[in-house]
Image (cartoon, helix red, strand yellow):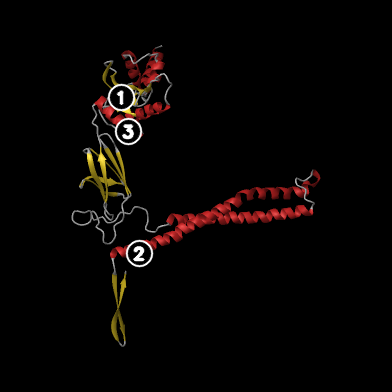
Amino acid sequence: MNRLLVSLCVAALGVVLLAPAAPARAAGKPQVAVLGLEVIDDGTGLDPALIGHAKELTEALRRRPKSGTGPYQLAAGSERDLAELKFIRNCENEASDCMAQIGSELGVAFLIYGKLEKRPGGVQVSLKLFGVGGKQVMKSLSELIPTAETTSTELERASKAFYAKLTGATLATTVSVNANVRVGKVLVDGVAKADLVDGTAQLTGLANGRREIAIESPGFILGTQVVTVKSGADLDLHFTLTRAGAGDPLPGIGPGGSGDGPVDTGAGDRPGGGYRAAFWGSTVVAVASAATWIYGYTQQQGALDRLKQNEFTCPPSPANQARDGADCDLGEKWETISYFTVPLTFVAGALAGYTFYKGYVASSSADKRSASAKRKARGPEVVVVPTATPQGAGATVRIDF
């Protein structure tokens, strides 16, 4: 009996030790759930446009704690709709006890929820920040978004303002920079603010107003854009820098420059390379398809000739199956294949002609124009070639314009 009790105790201890521990909540910012905004019916039915605005605004609000902006962190698995959770718990409204129960089940300290209503001239947005532990609304707002400002961009900007008012988050603007060069400096009003890494950079904390954003990269002409910075309105800027010529200044070269030389963008110096590869690929397809078509045609004609000699019985009768069955099958097979090879040959041939023109004819003309433009940019070039003969010495002068 004692042995049995000892064995049971050891087994129970093993289960306790081997059982997986409950996952601990990550330390850091308090968890918040942003519930899907509820659309209120004004008596004329739910407006599909209003439903779309509610979804866009909900996702925009959720992106704020996801990105680490503000004092809260979005809880995992908390992306639920307010109307759904109220229906499941049979809540007629957002009573404190009901919202506290929802927050506890989601495992969060705070809830952000609200509704959208259609109004003359726009959309009325009502939002609340609810403290689960204290079972009370901590902050609320109700604002009208004009109809002209219900685009995706404007709703994104509005979501930042709403989230900042509810949570006290800083209303910052992010400027995302993308360029066709891998490395460089991002300048704001002539002052270096960020490094370009793999062609991208981000700027934050810019003051409102007109700002000159520039990209400086060795071997390329300085690229600039003038933009207007507004609080909460993110900007995406794209720069396409041009390689510097022989007489153009090279940003970053010289006193204070990096001196790393031109950056290879991967585009290559030879234009039309992609079209040339496509030309050879389409040519191979066209030739292979044409060869298959010709071979199948000869096979089909041979089978047809043999069938004509046997009075052409397709499909063959049971008595002539052994004689004509193979030729009938052969003719039918190659006829089916020709339905694909004939159009494929013409399409591949047309593509080969087009890519040949773009890859060899047009790109050659572009090379000549580029070379001519470079010569014009340099101006007239004087070439002196010395000559020597048994009768004496001299020189030949040539001027290239």
- Single out the residue that lies furthest toward the bottom: 391
Residue 109 appears in view: no
Mark nearer the N terminus (1 vs 3): 1
The mark that comes first in sequence, 2 or 3, is: 3
Question: Reading the chain from its start, which is encountered first: label 2 or label 1?
Answer: 1
Secondary structure category for the residue under label 1 = strand
Of 81 and 299, nearer the camera is: 81
Residue 275: % across, % down: 45, 55
Which type of secondary structure does the marked residue at label 2 adopt?
A: helix
Q: Which mark is residue 32?
A: 1
Residue 40 appears at what percent x and percent y?
Answer: 38, 20
- Amino acid type at mark 1: Val
What separation in Å lies between label 2 and label 3 (alpha carbons)?
A: 47 Å
Residue type at tag 3: Glu
What's the residue at 23%, 42% (across, down)? Answer: 210
Quick check: 48 left or right of 208? right
Q: CA distance from mark 1 to mark 3?
A: 24 Å
Residue annotated with mark 3: 154
Q: Disc 2 marks which amino acid?
A: Ser
Q: Which class describes the residues within 10 Å of circle 1: few (<14), some (14-19), or many (20+)?
A: many
Name the residue that disc number 2 marks: 372
Q: CA distance from mark 2 to mark 1?
A: 63 Å
